[in-house]
Amino acid sequence: MLAIAARELSPSKLKPFFTISHVFLQSPRIRGTNSSISRFFSPFLHHPHWNKTPESPSFSASCFCSSSTSSSSSSSSDFLPLTRDGNYDDATPVTAVCPGCGIHVQDSDPKHPGFYIRPSMKKQKSDLNRILKSNRHLVPVSQETEFTDSIKRGLIVEPRIVDPDSKEEAEPESADGRPVVCARCHSLRHYGKVKDPTVENLLPDFDFDHTVGRRLGSPSGARTVVLMVVDASDFDGSFPKRVAKLVSRTIDENQTAWKEGKSGNIPRVVLVVTKIDLLPSSLSPTRFEHWVRQRAREGGLSKIAKLHFVSPVKNWGIKDLVEDVAQMAGKRGHVWAVGAQNAGKSTLINAVGKAVGGKVTHLTEAPVPGTTLGIIRVEGVLPFQAKLFDSPGLLNPHQITTRLTREEQKLVYVSKELKPRTYRIKEGYTIHIGGLMRLDIDELSVDSVYVTVWASSYIPLHMGKKENAHKILQDHFGLQLQPPIGQNRVQELGKWVRKEFRVKGDNWDASSVDIAASGLGWFAIGLKGEAILSAWTYEGIDLFVRNSLLPQRSQTFEDSGFTVSKVVAKADQSLIQMQKETQKKQRQNDGNNPEPRSSSNSFTAPSMTC
């Protein structure tokens, strides 16, 4: 980074700010330390120029900075690389980045990204001795060419022989055998939240086109396999359309070049639909495959080499996926896992690492978007010299989850199998999904229509007359209808806008079309006729119509009003408590300021409003 910045400046603005001898940089004391000096000079020490023997004792390294650079008394953290490139480059050691999220680690500034605390040598030796006594090491034999294919699928069990007193630097591990991660990953793993979200604002946005896209589009180099990961419960919201169009364009261009006898590296796309355990088990696999291929084509993905349905939690389809990816990658291929934020890439790679029996990965998993911050080179998962890279999740600004707080995201996040909630509804009525989406039945060519809601079971629903929808927004958004949590959050989410849809169906027994909101869920419409419907959500959120994903509906219908949920019950309790406190204060005020009694003995009971 320093070299790039220097090249952008004119020579007149450059001046030497230090001169360090080659002998000083090569000394064991400097090379072995974990100080910020060692990390800062690491790129220079690994450069081929530094590996040459100096011609004279006066050989030295001169680095340049702009004349506006601060004094040498500035903190060492100022020199830390604020990038999202992770450890893609082989020259970057694995221990230079957090194994959980891919950010460059440092131990000098807790307010800086990548901060971590290195355990003491005494604790590392104690943990290592404990691990050696309790565990044995599995060694994959896939690289032994003289073995048959059947033996290659097995493992040789050998004891791991490690000298606790060895001075060889290894990846530090915690008491449970997991590598030490940055403070952010530690907070996500143990508390499910980021301790200090403001620290992430220091990081630059992840530039997919520059960091990954140019490598995917290169006509030469290692064979490329794109592992496109999509969330089954939010297919359209998590489908990376920009990546799909980029890869499809690259395939067409490089294939044309290859036919002309030129160099043409044709990427192979493996579409992985993960979290299929969240969909009902009654869904037909054949119908689902047809639906996925159609949505992928409409999203810009022209060619799919392989399609896999997997569940890392249930370990469904992982081994078949690994075999196909390893075959397509070959001995030296590069496999890129790409997808939207919170699509499940890191969880999938961790499951792959366990399935192959090699080095188990420890990527950070959390039900919040943007867990991975930099590119992570995952070692020991693919055979031979093939490499697997986990990339930061791509931000979809039209997903509703991008506007929600961490607590609100937990309500929207689907963590167990989706269950249908069905209404039989007439013209002039409306259904709310929390305070995030609403569907109005404007006109029907038939008497009624079936509307099935597919969304997180933690989100409360409400069905009522359309003429009362505005009052529902004013009185219940942020309270009985959450998310958002708190009435003040309603204004923060933006303007409430309407989009009209004209739909038709030919079956009463199954849903025909879906009206979906990116990152939230969808209304499945079942009717035999035509209808004009209006969907409402916050401005900028994607609303779209598609063929129905899940045609079935619930055997029982929901009643009008609010659905029974913990959110509604808690809001009702809070409202009752507020009313009691108000009445108590009113009685106290009446006691302090008694009004003169009239001569009449009549008594009027106070009115109660429900």
Image (cartoon, rainbow, N blue to C red):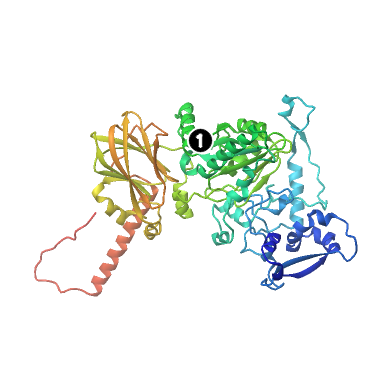
Q: Is residue 264 above or below residue 195?
A: above
Looking at the image, residue 196 sits to the left or right of residue 498; the answer is: right
Under circle 1, the secondary element is: helix
Q: How many marks?
A: 1
* Residue 320 locus on image (x, y percent): 61, 30
* Residue 241 locus on image (x, y percent): 50, 43
Residue indicated by mark 1 = 276
Task: Evaluate whether residue 428 shows in this view.
Answer: yes
* Residue 402 locus on image (x, y percent): 47, 52
Q: Residue furthest right?
A: 56
Q: Quadrant of residue 282?
A: top left
Q: Amino acid at mark 1?
A: Ile
254 and 237: which is toward the camera? 254
Q: Residue furthest left?
A: 600
Image point (66%, 49%), residue name: 99
273 and 49: which is toward the camera? 49
Task: Evaluate whether residue 479 shows in this view.
Answer: no
- Crowding at dot 1, Cα within 10 Å, few <14 / some 14-19 / many 20+, comes out as some
Image point (75%, 62%), residue name: 35
Looking at the image, residue 123 sits to the left or right of residue 396; the answer is: right
Q: Quadrant of residue 564?
A: top left
The N terminus lies in quadrant? bottom right
The C terminus lies in quadrant? bottom left
Q: Is residue 303 above or below residue 337?
A: above
* Residue 239 locus on image (x, y percent): 50, 41
552 and 224: which is toward the camera? 224
